[in-house]
Image (cartoon, rainbow, N blue to C red):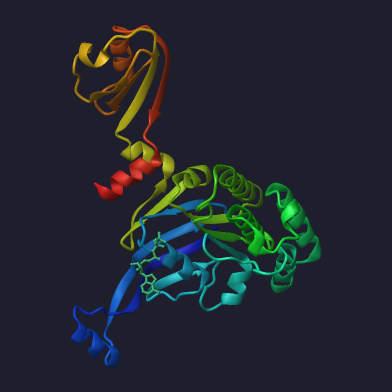
Amino acid sequence: MTLIKVENVTKEYKRKKSSQNLKEELLHIFHPKYENVRAVDNIDFSIEEGEAVGYIGPNGSGKSTTIKMLTGILTPTKGNIYVNNRIPTKERRKNNREIGVVTGNRSLLFWDVPVIESFNLLQKMYEIPSHIYEKNLREFTELLELHSLLTVPERQLSLGQRMRCNITAAFLHDPKIVYLDEPTIGLDTKSKNSIRNFIKKINEEKKTTFLITSHDFQDIEALCKRIIVIDHGKIILDNHIENVRKEFEKYKHIVFEVDNNMPMKLAAPIMNGVKFIYNDCYYVEVEYEIESVEAKTIIDLVSNYCQIKDISISGRDIEHIISDILYK
Ligand SMILES: Nc1ncnc2c1ncn2[C@@H]1O[C@H](COP(=O)(O)OP(=O)(O)OP(=O)(O)O)[C@@H](O)[C@H]1O
């Protein structure tokens, strides 16, 4: 079932025009001039129930604007958005009950009261039946290790602790869809892993649908099978990560563990599509173009010069592939 449908959506902001000189600046105080900024430009996509989709793009490409339209905070300038068959801006209250939103820079908790009090207030706001609330609270406290944090006010929590509590707050009412805007920004590896494991579990067990923006590609690779890439407000790619890898991956690396000190770079013949990246007494690293050379050819070549003890072959990570698509 399609849960999110975005059809030919454009969003323009009105922004005060900046002036070039003091005279113009003074004139603008009395007669301000405005210009339109097109943050999202005729985008189209749909997301099925239970999918976890990575929404990726450089700073200012239109990700947050899209999420704000999906949550009903902003109205599209053009086009249609349907979330669970509703127009979010027209049925905001109903929409709000079915979604959760987590952003790295806005909190769902009250600053000065113990975390558990914030959770209790959310239960009342969302009218969560007691048995569901208590079950979720118990489960999430366990998964995100919140036991010692529940009695502490938000202002006394570290960034990672605050994010774990915010994630809990966003999931207490069993939302159908969760928008995660930079959920692991500024966190250490342990906190990132704990949040990723939690999201993965909820996605798998409750079939919750996720749209995730993150500049950390490890979040995207850990959580999403599909990515949508937006640049200057336009969608430039919408595909499964594995398909993107297959389509755009041009090079692979082979690292050989060897047991002699042959200067490969000098000894091996120069081959088209093959580059010696590194070699010392123990390791040789080769980059090869997958279209023109086979891994076997390189293995045979290296084995002519060295005793090979171990081999590992790796592709380029998705971050580099996307960066090539965006910037080349
Ligand atoms: N309230 C606003 N008024 C005017 N322009 C805005 C407003 N909000 C965003 N913009 C502009 O719209 C464009 C898209 O911004 P948006 O915040 O959606 O990008 P983003 O992809 O979320 O960026 P980031 O990765 O930095 O969070 C930018 O050019 C931004 O300057």
Quarter holding ligand 1 = bottom left
Q: Is residue 117 above or below residue 221?
A: below
Choose top left, top right, bottom left or bottom right for residue 20.
bottom left
Residue 48 location (% of width, % of height): 52, 55
Q: Residue furthest right?
A: 131
Residue 124 location (% of width, % of height): 74, 72
210 lies left or right of 144 = left
Residue 37 location (% of width, % of height): 31, 73
Q: Residue at x 26, y 29 (%)?
A: 291
Q: Residue furthest bottom?
A: 30
Q: Is residue 40 above or below residue 297?
A: below
Q: Residue at x 61, y 76 (%)?
A: 93
71 lies left or right of 162 = left
Quarter holding the N terminus is bottom right
32 lies left or right of 198 = left
Q: Residue at x 68, y 69 (%)?
A: 112
Q: Residue at x 42, y 43 (%)?
A: 241
Residue 174 location (% of width, % of height): 67, 60
Nearer the observer, 30 or 315: 30
Q: Is residue 241 above or below residue 122?
A: above
